[in-house]
Structure formats: C-alpha cells, structure tokens
C-alpha cells in the first residue's frame, strides 16, 4: 500500500512520515480507552497535512504517539509503526527518540499561556532547546535565539530574551513557541490547535506566520484543528478523523469540493461560511462523539448518521477510494480521495446536508446501541425518554 | 520587588499588634486570676491582693495594656518570678539550644522529605510510592513523645549507640560563648566534644523532624505530580531535553514554590514541637524552660516565650515569602 | 450571511442521569477506598473500646498493688503493671474514654467557634471580614500546641480547660476554611445560575452553598480529631493533663514511663500504640473523605 517515490508519478513527494496501522490505547482505572484504532497515513516532504475532527477524536493522541509523548503510564502504542525517515519511532529506544524530538520533529501546542515554563526566561527555554541537540556555545545559541525571535516578528528581541513568559501576550507567546519549534530547522512541524486559545484577530497572524515559515524552510506540517476554516487555506491535504479512525482523506481542494463522508458533510454544514446562501441554515451534527471506552463496533459514526444502513451498525467500513479502480496515491497533489463509508452521500445530498433519496430512513439501532438521532427526536418532542445506559 | 517586601513587612505589623492584644487578653480577660494561679489555690486573700498590685492587675485595663505595650517595645518582657532575672536575658541564653534543635530537625525533614517526595512522584502507584505514603502517614500519626521515647529506648537503652538526654556529655566542660553547643565546642577547639554534641543532637532532631518530614514528603510528592502534568513539561519533553533536565529544571523549579511555602509553615510546628521534644530529651532550650515555667507558675516566662515564638514564626514566614518571590518571577516582576 | 441555528442539543437532558447526589457518590467512592476503610476500622476499635471500657477492662484502672511495680507483660496483665502496680491495659482502655470524649468535645466546640467566625466573615464581608480574619491570622501565628499550653497554663488544669484549649487551636483553621469556601462559592457558576433562575438567597445558601462548604469542614474536622487526640496526650505528657493524677490518660501515662524507660519499656507501648491507632484512623478517614467528597482529586 505504501507508494515509494521511485514508483510514483513525478509530482508525488518523497515520503517523510509513514504511519501504519497505529493503535493507541489508554489503560485507566475506569477501563480501556480506544483512542486511535489502527490508522494509516503518509506525509511527503514539504507537504502540509490537516488533521480535522471534533475534540476527543484522536487527533492529538495520534501526534503525541508519533513523538512518543503519550501520558505515562496509561497511554501506550499497542500496535503499528511510525516510520519517520525510514526509522520506526514506535520501537526506537527512548534516548534516540529524544533526539528526534525538537530536532527533527517540533511541536506547537494549543495553549501558549501554559506551554511555556512560567519561571524560566525565554532565553533559557530557547537556548536549552538548541544546546540539547547541537554542539554550539551558549553565545551562539543565544545569537540564534535572537535571530529566531526576529523572524517570528518579536520586536527588540535582544531585550525581550530576558523576559519571562507572563510578560508576553498570548499571541506573542505563540510566536515564541513557533520560534522555538523552528530553532533546529526540523523536517516536520506538528501544530496542535495552535490558534484555538488566541483572539480571533491574532489567529490569522499566527497562521500566516506558520504557513510562511514552513513554506520558506520546506518544513512539512501537520496541522491539527477542529476548525475546517483554518485548514482550508493552510494545507495541501486533509485527514478527517472520527473516534480514532480516519474516515475521509483527500486533497484540501477535493475535500471541500466534494465531501464524501457523512461526518465531513456534517462538519462542513455546521460551520458558518461567508459564501452561505441567504437563509441557508447551519445544521449541527446531532448527538455526541462516541464514548471511547467502548470497543469499536460497526461504523463509529452510525449513531449520529442520517445515511446509515443496517450493515453500518455491525460492519466498520474500511478506508477505500471514492472512485473504484484508480491507482492509489497516498501523498501529494494527486492523492486519491478515500472514505470509510458504506453509503456515502450523493453530491446533491452533500450540498444540502441531508439524505434526499426517496424511501431512505436511517436504519434503526439494534438492541443495546445508543441512537443519538432517536434521542434527539425524543427531546425535541418534549418527551424525556428513558435513556439506555 | 522592594515594594512587595515592604508590603509584606507592613502586613505583619497588625498581626504582631493583634498578637499582643490576644496574649494580653488571655491574662486579663479570661476567667481565672493569674495572681491566684501563681500563688496556688489555697493562698491567703491578702497575699493574692498584694500579688495583683505587684503585677499591676489593679490598674484599669487600658492602662495595663499601655504599660504592657510600652514594656514590650522597650524589650522588657518582665521578670521571672522564680529567679527575678529579666525574661529576655534567660530567653536569649536558652534560645540557641532550640535553634540548634529545630534547624537540625528541619535539615533532617527537608533533606529526606524532598527526595522521598520526588522519588514517590516519579513512580506513582508503585510499591515505592506506597511505602512512602505509609511512612508519611506514620509521621503525622505518631506523636513526638511516643517516637522520642521509642527512639531513646531503642538507640540508647538497648543498642547504646546514641545518648538519650542532654546536649552534651556533662563530664565535658565547654565554655559557653554563643550558647550554640556545636559552635562553642569548635570555638574551644574540641573536636571530640563537637562530635559528642552532634551525637546528642541526632535522636531529638529525628523525633522533632518526623511530622515536618511527613508533611514535606506529601507536599513534594503532590507538587511534583501536579507540575509533571503541566503543558510546559510536555513542551520541554517535546523539545527533546534530557529527562534529568526536564525533571531537575522544568519540574522542580516550579514544584519548589509550594514546597518552600510549606517549609516556612513547618517552622511553627517545629517550635511548638520543640517544647515536647526538649522535655523528652532533657534538652536545655526555650521549650523545656517553658514547661518548667508552667510548673512553677512563672507566667511572664510562658507568655513571653509564646510571644517570641510567634514573632519568630512570623519573621521566618516573611523571609520565606520573600524567597518565594525570588523563585517566582510572576511576583518578582509585578 | 444570514444563518439560523436549527435543532436542539440534547446534552442537558443526558447529563442529568449522571448525577446521583453528592453524598451517595461520595459514599460509594469511600467504600472503594481501602485506606479509608482501614481508618474506619481503627476508629471503630477506638470508639468501641472507649464505650465498652467498663466491660472490656480486665481490672479496675485505679486499683494499685496488683503486683510488683513495673512488672512486665504477663498472661495475667497483658500490658504489664505501672509504677503503682496498676494494670496498664485497663488504664489504656479507660484512657480511650478521655481521649475520645475530649477529642470530640474540643473539635465540636472548635467547629462552633470557627463556624460562627467563618460564617460571619464570609457571609458579611467588609470590615467584619477584615477584623475577624486578622484575628484568625494572629491565632494561627501561635504555633499549634503552644497556644493550648498557654491556655491551660493560665486557666489552670482540668478537662474543660483542656477541651477549650484544643478547641481554640482548631477554631481558626475551621473559620478560614468556611470563609474560603463561602467566598469561592459566592462567585461559583452554579450559584450564579440558581440566582438567575430566581432561587431566593436563603434557598441558595441551604441547597447549594452549605453542602459544598460542609464537605471541606467535614474533612478538616476529621483530620482535627487526629490532631486533638495527639494534642490532648501531649498536654498530658507535659503535666497539663487532668488535675487528678490518678486519671488514666494516655499522655500522662507516658510521662510516668519516662521515669522508668530502662526498667519498664512496656509502659511506652500500650498507650503509644493506642494514640497511634486512633490518630491513624482519623487521618486515613480524613484523607479518604477528602478524596471521595472531591471527585476532582480522583486519581
């Protein structure tokens, strides 16, 4: 299934990251949490990939698993490979993974207010990153830090270097995080909801900065977000995740032009858009994400899906090309559009956000399965139904 | 920063003032007549009246308070009924013994408690963690006098490893210059006496330090666990720093903050515990002196010692707060 | 861009089923907390012994001359005899009464004093709060048992004085806790919510604020019982115990043992273990209650 550069067409980039059947579980006192359930995806050099989904769908866990920073001792990679530059990070000794972190793969986290150590100066936090991976003098590291702060648009970097995080605004702190992430010219930068905690006006600036600097340096990017609007202009390709599965993957353009999984359709319709027609309603995705403590059974989206069929309750569909019979390309602008769905919405249904084919009714839930659509109907009718536990 | 220190200093003033009022009120407002208490239950009324006059208890209350405050501000803590010496003089002679004991107990408690807490936090829910938890539970549940007596019995009576009582072998005559036994023995150039004094210090310090040890261990464990879950620790790991640096710099630098505060608060417990410890180990310090004064109804001594202990406790916590500000840039730069 | 939101989020209705009442939740969590169960067993032993002292004690605790002074433990006298030839075990059993009684009364009195001060402070606020909290600061600046020593030294020896002394050392802590939770709760979201849906302020206080403030106080009171047992024994050890020297009180009994450490080490262990068991019991139960009443602390 892996497509190597030699066999692929000319516009397929060389593979940098190849995640295969990644399985992550958390073993807690309350039971097992099925966080990531055997996902596979690739990332080419210089490629920018969006990872989209509601909170709790496994996006962040996927990335923590890639750099092996899952919360210990509960979180464990229980299967699969994370091939980065040909090396399997999932089995690499801790000491060697440490060198990949920060040097080859850099991360930017969601909340800049809590991601910088409050009692250590910006200077020390930047210098220690550089010194940890390169044999350079503190002076050179300091000069590099000043250069980096200038690059991310921090005024008077020489003096600001001595500051503590609380002396910066949220946006400025995220710039510092970006500068720190770029300090060692990593091959891959993972930005986990980098703008969610910021003011709307600052968000665009920070996104633009990430976009510009990664393009300039040829750094690959994985951008994690729940906001499709953010990935639209920032990424080449998008993986849509739901309940620890990738349910749709396509180039950014294809995904917006022809969303093919009911969940993606739902995401697009629950997002306010500037180009929405007068009176076009926002349609929320009904119900809640599934309880990840239950082992996956059937399609995870079935309880909330208006397109579901009987088999959706029992049989989890694999990720397959939308159009059968095409050669599989996993990276680059020619990447194959794939979805995991037994009954994908037709183009006009995707446009409207609900099934229109005559005679279709969502298949009823079998005994013991939570049906979010039925629950919703009951609440709307003003009848408080006894809910199955 | 300077502003912070000044503000913190000023905030201690009303507490000191309130302390003087409360101590004053205890003597003068609570039921019971100190004069009668001093003289015993069966004293003749004339004697009690004379004692009241001598203590100034016949004056109006406000005047009594003014006199009391005036004396206090002049450093006059009154005179002992027993030997008629100024209380302050005797206090200063005995205080070094208490300092020696409490400092040793603190070194023991912090020196052992902080590493133990870090050890337990690094392996939460492990056997090692469980043992540390049990030890710290015993620490706060075993009273000083029970632990002290047990240590004496085990290490002095049975094993004969360490002396049971006193600050130094009474056969060694050392000139008292500073009243710190460890310093005086060194000033006298007597290494053997120094070692003897050190041996005398071990058991009392362990007995006194056991409660702070337990509390410091718990707090350190909780603080390290807390900080270890912070986002910035994940950032530090994501930057590829060595685990020693993540632990030693990024975690501990923050975990110190609550630990330092608790260290300061433990001083109060140590001073109070010193009263019991000194009694168990016949350690000549302020604590033992207070107990003797209670038995002798020498109430100026009791009152002044409590005042001084509270004063020292406040001063120590003031110093701790300033130290906290140094450790915490959010206060330093505000 | 004119958009309307369609549909209702069913979240509210679903959350309802999860809440089963604070106390029942806490109780079920407490039942799973092994250390807390162990603590409760210790406390049960302690309380049973105290109540059934006349039945359980093999001898009259004050009857001397049962054998030679300082006789070591034997099959007749399981914990040996003390200086006056009294049965040590019987004295420890009777001593439980004093410890339990003084502990409960002093913590209750402390709760009343501290509760009133804390409620006034947190409820009224303003200068009342300032004055009362300064007073609390002052009391807290006098280290623990030293305050109790001072009070007993001035009021004279006696059980009521001891209880008052221990109550006074606890009261400021209770006052601060109650005030703290009242202040925090005044601004808490659910109080704002119930106020905005029109619940009267008395109802808010009773239904919402009090149960939350109470949980903190219950935990503190349980832990204070451990300290109280230790402090009472400490006062006894310093010779500030019950004025009648014959009274079987754990701390006073330990003082006697200091004189005869070499000859009769057994005199440390019986009262010592009794104090430790009761203190461990209350400490474990207090920690367990804290963990089960505050679900956020759940590991």
Image (cartoon, grey):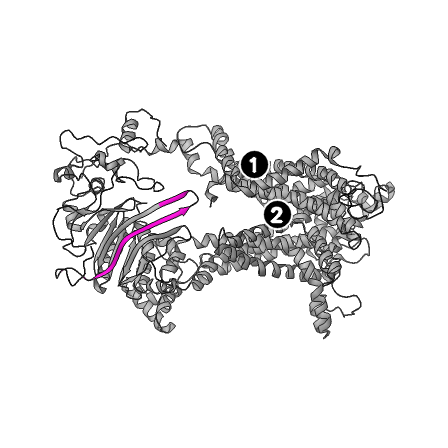
In the displayed structure, does residue C260 sit left or right of residue B186?
right
The span shown in magenta is: A11-33
Residue A20 covered by magenta stretch: yes
Residue A353 covered by magenta stretch: no
Q: Position of residue B133 (x, y in %)?
A: 56, 51
In the displayed structure, does residue B284 sit left or right of residue A92?
right
Q: Position of residue C200 (x, y in %)?
A: 45, 27
> Is residue B31 something that shows in the picture?
no
| Residue drawn at x 30%, y 68% as measured from the top left | A147
Q: Earlier in the sequence, mark 2 or mark 1?
A: 1
For label 1, the SS is helix
Residue closer to the observer: B38 or A28: A28
Q: Residue furthest front?
A: C75
> Is residue C155 something that shows in the picture?
yes
Residue closer to the observer: C186 or A13: A13
Q: Is circle 2 on the same chain as circle 1?
A: yes
Q: Which residue is mark 2?
A: C140
In the displayed structure, does residue C151 sit left or right of residue A171?
right
Q: Which mark is residue C120?
A: 1
Query: In the image, is residue B216 above or below residue A286?
Result: below
Q: Nearer the viewer, mark 2 or mark 1?
A: 2
């Amino acid at each position: 299934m892996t497509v190597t550069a030699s066999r692929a067409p000319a516009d397929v980039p060389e593979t940098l990251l190849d995640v295969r059947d990644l399985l992550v579980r958390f073993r807690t006192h309350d039971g097992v949490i099925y966080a990531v359930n055997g996902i596979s995806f690739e990332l080419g050099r210089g490629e920018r990939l969006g990872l989209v989904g509601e909170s709790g769908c496994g996006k962040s866990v996927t990335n923590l698993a890639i750099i092996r920073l899952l919360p210990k001792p509960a979180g464990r990679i229980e299967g699969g490979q994370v091939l980065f530059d040909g090396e399997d990070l999932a089995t690499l000794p801790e000491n060697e993974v440490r060198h990949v972190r920060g040097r080859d793969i850099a991360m930017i986290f969601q909340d800049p207010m809590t991601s910088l150590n409050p009692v250590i100066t910006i200077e020390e936090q930047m210098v220690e990153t550089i010194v940890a991976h390169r044999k350079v003098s503190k002076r050179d590291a300091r000069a590099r830090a000043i250069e980096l702060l200038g690059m991310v648009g921090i005024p008077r970097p020489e003096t600001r270097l001595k500051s503590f995080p609380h002396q910066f605004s949220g946006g400025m702190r995220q710039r510092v995080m970006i500068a720190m992430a770029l300090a060692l010219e990593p091959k891959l930068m993972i930005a986990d909801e980098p703008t969610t905690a910021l003011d709307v006006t600052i968000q665009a600036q920070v996104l633009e900065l990430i976009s510009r600097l990664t393009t300039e340096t040829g750094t690959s990017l994985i951008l994690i977000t729940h906001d499709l609007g953010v990935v639209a202009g920032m990424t080449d390709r998008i993986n849509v995740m739901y309940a620890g599965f990738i349910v749709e993957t396509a180039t950014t353009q294809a995904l917006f032009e022809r969303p093919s999984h009911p969940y993606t359709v739902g995401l697009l319709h629950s997002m306010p858009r500037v180009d929405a027609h007068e009176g076009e309603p926002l349609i929320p995705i009904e119900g809640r994400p599934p309880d990840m403590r239950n082992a996956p059974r059937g399609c995870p989206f079935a309880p909330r899906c208006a397109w579901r069929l009987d088999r959706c309750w029992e049989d989890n569909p694999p990720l397959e090309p939308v159009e059968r019979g095409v050669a599989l390309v996993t990276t680059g602008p020619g990447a194959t559009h794939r979805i995991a769905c037994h009954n994908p919405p037709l183009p006009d249904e995707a446009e409207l956000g609900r099934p229109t084919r005559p005679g279709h009714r969502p298949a009823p839930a079998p005994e013991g399965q939570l049906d979010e659509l039925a629950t919703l109907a009951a609440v709307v009718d003003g009848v408080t139904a006894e809910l199955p536990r | 920063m300077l502003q912070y220190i000044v503000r913190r200093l000023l905030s201690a003033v009303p507490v000191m003032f309130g302390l003087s009022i409360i101590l004053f009120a205890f003597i003068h407002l609570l039921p019971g007549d100190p004069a009668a208490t001093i003289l015993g239950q069966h004293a003749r009324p004339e004697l009690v009246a004379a004692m009241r006059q001598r203590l100034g208890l016949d004056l109006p209350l406000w005047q009594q308070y003014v006199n009391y405050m005036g004396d206090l501000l002049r450093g006059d803590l009154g005179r002992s009924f027993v030997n008629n010496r100024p209380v302050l003089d005797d206090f200063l002679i005995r205080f070094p013994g208490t300092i020696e004991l409490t400092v040793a107990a603190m070194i023991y408690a912090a020196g052992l408690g902080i590493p133990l807490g870090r050890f337990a936090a690094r392996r939460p829910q492990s056997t090692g963690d469980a043992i540390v938890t049990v030890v710290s539970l015993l620490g706060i549940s075993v009273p000083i006098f029970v632990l002290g007596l047990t240590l004496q019995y085990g290490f002095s009576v049975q094993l004969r490893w360490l002396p049971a009582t006193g600050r130094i072998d009474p056969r060694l005559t050392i000139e008292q210059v500073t009243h710190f036994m460890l310093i005086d023995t060194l000033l006298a150039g007597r290494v053997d006496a120094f070692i003897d004094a050190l041996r005398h210090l071990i058991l009392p310090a362990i007995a006194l330090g056991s409660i702070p040890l337990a509390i410091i261990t718990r707090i350190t464990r909780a603080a390290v666990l807390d900080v270890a879950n912070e986002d910035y620790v994940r950032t530090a790991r994501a930057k590829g720093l060595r685990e020693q640096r993540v632990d030693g710099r990024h975690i501990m630098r923050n975990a110190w903050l609550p630990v330092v505060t608790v260290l300061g608060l433990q001083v109060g417990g140590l001073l109070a515990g010193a009263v019991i410890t000194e009694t168990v180990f016949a350690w000549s310090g302020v604590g033992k002196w207070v107990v003797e004064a209670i038995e002798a109804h020498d109430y100026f001594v009791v009152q002044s010692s409590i005042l001084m202990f509270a004063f020292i406790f406040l001063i120590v916590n003031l110093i701790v707060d300033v130290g906290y500000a140094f450790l915490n840039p959010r206060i330093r730069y505000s | 861009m004119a958009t309307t939101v369609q549909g209702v989020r069913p979240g509210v209705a679903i959350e309802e089923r999860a809440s089963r009442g604070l106390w029942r939740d806490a109780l079920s969590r407490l039942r799973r907390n092994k250390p807390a169960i162990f603590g409760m067993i210790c406390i049960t032993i302690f309380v049973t012994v105290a109540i059934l002292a006349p039945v359980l004690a093999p001898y009259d605790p004050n009857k001397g001359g049962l054998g030679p002074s300082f006789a070591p433990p034997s099959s007749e006298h399981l914990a040996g005899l003390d200086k006056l030839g009294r049965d040590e075990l019987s004295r420890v059993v009777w001593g439980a009464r004093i410890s339990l009684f003084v502990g409960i009364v002093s913590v209750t009195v402390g709760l009343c004093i501290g509760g009133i001060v804390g409620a006034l402070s947190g409820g009224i606020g303003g200068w009342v709060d300032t004055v009362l909290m300064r007073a609390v600061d002052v009391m807290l600046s006098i280290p623990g048992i030293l305050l109790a020593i001072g009070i007993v030294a001035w009021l004279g020896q006696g059980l009521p004085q001891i209880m008052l002394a221990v109550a006074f050392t606890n009261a400021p802590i209770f006052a601060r806790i109650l005030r703290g939770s009242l202040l925090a709760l005044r601004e808490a979201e659910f109080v704002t919510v119930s106020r905005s849906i029109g619940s009267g302020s008395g109802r808010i206080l009773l239904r919402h604020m009090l149960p939350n403030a109470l949980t903190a106080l219950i935990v503190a009171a349980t832990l204070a019982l451990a300290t109280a047992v230790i402090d009472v024994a400490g006062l006894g050890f310093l010779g500030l115990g019950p004025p009648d020297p014959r009274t079987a009180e754990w701390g006073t009994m330990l003082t006697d043992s200091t004189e005869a450490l070499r000859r009769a080490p057994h005199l440390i262990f019986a009262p010592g273990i009794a104090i430790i068991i009761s203190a461990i019991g209350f400490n474990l139960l207090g920690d367990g209650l804290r963990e089960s009443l505050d679900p956020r602390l759940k590991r």
